[in-house]
């Protein structure tokens, strides 16, 4: 049975060691991948690291290309104001609200994750700040 394993980016230090092995020890890219315990499917990563160094670019892990936040800061502010105004509203209502006022179409899951990141949680059918104290 296969399990999905989340791959974290290799550290900049490891990337540097891999590139040094390829350049200074004239090690092949596949051999470098094996030597440093990076998966063989990461041979393409080794090639990218070597190319980055040749082009004078950083080896630090960058943001995944094409991964931009689904909700902009202004959309998050609208969502926050909506929660404060209508704490009882359901996720579907919030999706419809954002589509109407901001032209943004996102899933209920995206709304839920965004609200939780903003510090809101559901209490007795209402969205409230987790650190809010009851009076």
Image (tube, rainbow, N blue to C red):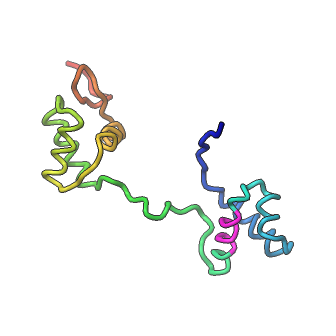
Give the residues in magenta. Answer: 43-50
- The answer to which quarter of the image holds residue 102 is bottom left
Q: Is residue 87 magenta?
A: no
- The answer to which quarter of the image holds residue 84 is top left
Give me the residue at 30% from left, 52% from top: 71
Q: Is residue 8 above or below residue 22?
A: above
Judged from this view, the residue extending furthest toward the bottom is 55
Judged from this view, the residue extending furthest toward the right is 25
Of 63 and 95, which appears nearest the observer? Answer: 95
Q: Is residue 54 above or below residue 7?
A: below
Side of 91 relative to 57 (left or right): left
Give me the residue at 22% from left, 54% from top: 104
Which quadrant is home to the N terminus?
top right
Main SS type for the magenta part? helix
Q: Position of residue 58 (x, y in %)?
A: 60, 71
Q: Position of residue 80 (x, y in %)?
A: 22, 42
Q: Is residue 49 above or below residue 12?
A: below
Side of 118 relative to 65 (left or right): left
Q: Position of residue 51 (x, y in %)?
A: 66, 76
Give me the residue at 24% from left, 36% from top: 91
Give me the residue at 60% from left, 64% from top: 60
Of 112 and 72, which appears nearest the observer? Answer: 112
Which quadrant is home to the C terminus?
top left
Q: Is residue 46 magenta?
A: yes
């Amino acid at each position: 049975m296969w399990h999905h394993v989340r791959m974290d980016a290799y550290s900049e230090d490891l990337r540097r060691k891999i590139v040094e092995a390829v350049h200074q020890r004239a090690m092949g890219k596949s051999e470098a991948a094996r030597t440093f315990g990076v998966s063989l499917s990461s041979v393409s990563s080794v090639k990218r690291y070597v190319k980055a160094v040749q082009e004078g670019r950083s080896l630090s892990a960058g943001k995944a290309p094409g991964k931009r936040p689904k909700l902009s800061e202004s959309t998050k502010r609208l969502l926050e104001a909506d929660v404060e105004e209508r704490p009882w509203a359901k996720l579907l209502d919030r999706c419809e609200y954002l589509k109407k006022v901001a032209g943004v179409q996102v899933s209920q899951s995206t709304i839920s994750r965004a609200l939780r990141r903003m510090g809101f949680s559901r209490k007795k059918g209402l969205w409230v700040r987790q650190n809010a104290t009851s009076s």
